[in-house]
Image (cartoon, rainbow, N blue to C red):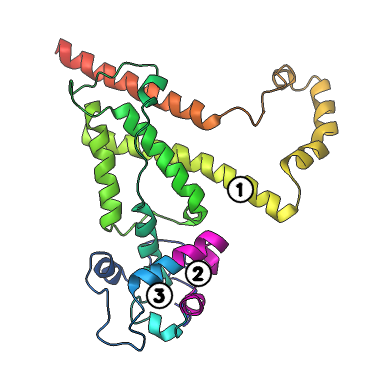
């Protein structure tokens, strides 16, 4: 790691669990919030993580360094190292911080939008898992929009802190009415999060393309229009040539479409399992 904390063990500082895992766990679970001594009593681990998240939100993860944070907090760089070893461990703390942000309340119309009744495999009184899936997807999308730097992080080895575990506990609690096996419940969470992350990354990449090129989406596609029109008239692309004019309209909500299809697919599996138990 560089002396200023700008580079983690992976070389670019974008992989969780790439630093001192034992130290990250101590910090996440309350094993070392405050050093025994330090020149700035007002400095806390919470302030450091809050500042790091704010910088990442505003300028991206690459802008986060121990040197930059010392400027933001008005302290010496070495003072920060009394609280956190470096950027790799700081990234673990940042991730747990944003994962712990409050979840929105489930939407009342979530189950109705799925086109199904509210009967779950575990019977009356069980949480409506459709609303839970709906809330899970929307909250994750909101989180990625608030913190687009999350899309740049390799979370293959996430150091699990209290916020991450609390989020997983809430998600599993909302899905228990599905009546699926435990690995399948985790599969539901992974499927939903992967769908949301894919859409969020596409949206973030589109916004980044505008910033980098200075061209709006309309201007970009207008430049291609003459070539695409000739291609459609060539007869080489009969399927695309007969598609409706609004096929690629920005008004079509791909998030709503995909989420409804995911919920419908899960519903079919839940119904299949319930029927199998009935006939067993």
Question: Is label 2 in a helix, a strand or a loop?
Answer: loop
Q: Assess whether residue 164 is covered by the magenta stretch.
A: no
Residue 216 percent coordinates (x, y): 74, 45
Q: Give the label, 2 or 1, closer to the camera.
A: 2
Residue 54: numbered disc: none
Q: Residue at x 49, y 28 (%)?
A: 256
Residue neighbourhood size for the residue with mark 3, other residues' Cα within 10 Å, grouped as few (<14), some (14–19), many (≥20) = many
Residue at the spot of label 1: 205
Tell me whether the residue at label 2 lies in contact with that at label 3, contact meaning CB atoms closer than 8 angstroms. no
Q: Marks 1 and 3, Cα distance to the nearest angstrom?
A: 29 Å
Q: Earlier in the sequence, mark 2 or mark 3?
A: 2
Along the viewing direction, whichever of 84 and 55 lies nearer the viewer? 55
Q: Assess whether residue 61 is covered by the magenta stretch.
A: yes
Q: Earlier in the sequence, mark 1 or mark 3?
A: 3
On screen, residue 153 versus residue 82, left or right, reads right
Residue neighbourhood size for the residue with mark 2, other residues' Cα within 10 Å, grouped as few (<14), some (14–19), many (≥20) = many
* Residue 128 visible: yes
Residue 3 percent coordinates (x, y): 46, 83
Residue stretch rendered in magenta on the structure = 52-73
**Magenta region, mostly helix, strand or loop?**
helix
Q: Residue at x 16, y 10 (%)?
A: 279
Residue at the spot of label 3: 86
On screen, residue 121 versus residue 70, left or right, reads left
Residue neighbourhood size for the residue with mark 1, other residues' Cα within 10 Å, grouped as few (<14), some (14–19), many (≥20) = few
Question: Is label 3 in a helix, a strand or a loop?
Answer: loop
Residue at the spot of label 2: 64
Residue 220 percent coordinates (x, y): 77, 42
Q: Which image quadrant: the C terminus?
A: top left
Seen from this angle, which residue lies furthest left?
A: 280
């Amino acid at each position: 790691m560089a002396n200023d904390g700008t580079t983690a063990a992976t070389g670019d500082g974008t992989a969780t669990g790439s630093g001192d895992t034992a130290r990250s766990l101590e910090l996440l679970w309350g094993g070392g919030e405050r050093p025994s001594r330090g020149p700035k009593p007002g400095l806390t681990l919470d302030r450091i993580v809050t500042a790091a998240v704010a910088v990442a939100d505003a300028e991206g993860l690459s802008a986060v360094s121990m040197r930059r944070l010392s400027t933001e907090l008005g302290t010496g760089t070495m003072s920060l190292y009394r609280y956190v070893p470096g950027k790799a461990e700081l990234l673990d703390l940042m991730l747990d911080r944003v994962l712990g942000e409050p979840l929105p309340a489930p939407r009342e119309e979530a189950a109705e939008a799925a086109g199904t009744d509210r009967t779950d495999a575990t019977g009356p009184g069980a949480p409506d898992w459709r609303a839970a899936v709906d809330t899970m997807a929307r909250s994750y999308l909101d989180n990625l929009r608030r913190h687009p730097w999350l899309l740049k992080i390799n979370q293959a080895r996430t150091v699990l802190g209290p916020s991450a575990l609390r989020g997983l506990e809430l998600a599993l609690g909302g899905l228990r009415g599905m009546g699926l096996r435990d690995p399948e419940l985790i599969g539901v969470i992974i499927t939903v999060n992967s769908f949301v992350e894919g859409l969020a990354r596409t949206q973030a990449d589109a916004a980044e393309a505008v910033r980098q090129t200075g061209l709006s989406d309309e201007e970009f596609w207008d430049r291609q229009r003459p070539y695409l029109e000739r291609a459609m008239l060539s007869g080489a692309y009969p399927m695309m040539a007969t598609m409706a004019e609004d096929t690629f309209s920005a008004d079509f909500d791909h998030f709503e479409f995909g989420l409804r299809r995911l919920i419908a697919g899960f519903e079919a599996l839940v119904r299949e399992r319930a029927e199998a138990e009935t006939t067993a």
